[in-house]
Image (spheres, rainbow, N blue to C red):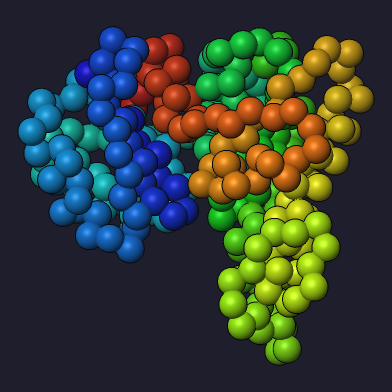
Amino acid sequence: MKLLLDLGNTRLKWAVADAGEWILRGAVAWEEDVSAVLAQAWGDLDSPERVLGASVVDAAREVQIERVMAEIFGQQVEWVRTAAEACGVRIAYADPQRLGVDRFLAMVAAHAVEEVPCVLAGIGTALTLDALAANGQHLGGLIAPGPLLMQHSLLGATARVRPEHPGVIRDLADNTADAVVSGCWQAVAALIERFAANVAKQSSRPQRLLLDGGDAAALLPLLGMPAELGADSVLRGLGVWAASHPAYPSS
């Protein structure tokens, strides 16, 4: 049995995997009492054989989770970091450590399912875009604000853009609230479409467009091209990593 941890900017997601199947899963937001929530969720679990974690948060939160793991299970966390090449995926960055492990593991998960050209879009606090060739070669990517961060940035940097009510997404907005929401969400959709179209020019094979992240489902209807919703790509990538790396030293 393995315990898989995805430490994202907004929350920690986890899954318990046994014989390749998830038998339990959950999430906790960082503003909650993380230690108490996890202690309750894991209180009746047997100690896992391994605990693997992927993190895009600061060292203090990683230490917090390490302490929780030691207290509940007496286990150490194996922190998976981005590798230049692993699980059939080869990173385009000259310094692979500069690529977020969430992006790396999402590519690992996608490549393990089907070896076809892929565009992966992570829609959360940040928008991340990556292109993956059928042979596992990472072609590069982009990073931009996610739709909600874009909205917050706009409102924080302007004096007169002060919506009086929550907006809704429209093609043509006739009020400030709708204009802000629609502009930000459609900007993200347009960037994804442009990125996918540019990547498609480099391959004669059809590509998959995979969306994941907290805002992926809301964004999907705005796209003018076929796309699929992924789910828990980082956790699934951790599962693939664990199967191909029997032992990985903690850092």
Looking at the image, which residue is at 79% across and 47% down?
A: 191
Q: Position of residue 128 (x, y in %)?
A: 65, 44
Looking at the image, which residue is at 73% across and 51% down?
A: 188
Looking at the image, which residue is at 40% across and 45% down?
A: 7
- Tell me if residue 142 can be seen: no
Is residue 206 found left or right of 43 in the rendered image?
right
The N terminus: image quadrant: top left
Q: Quadrant of residue 172?
A: bottom right
* Direction front: furthest residue: 174
Q: Position of residue 164 (x, y in %)?
A: 61, 83
* Direction right: furthest residue: 201
Is residue 125 found left or right of 168 in the rendered image?
left
Q: Quadrant of residue 226?
A: top right
Q: Quadrant of residue 243?
A: top left
Q: Position of residue 163 (x, y in %)?
A: 65, 80
Looking at the image, which residue is at 16% across and 54% down?
A: 36
Return the residue nearer the eye: 208 or 74.
208
Q: Is residue 84 positioned above or below 224 on the image?
A: above
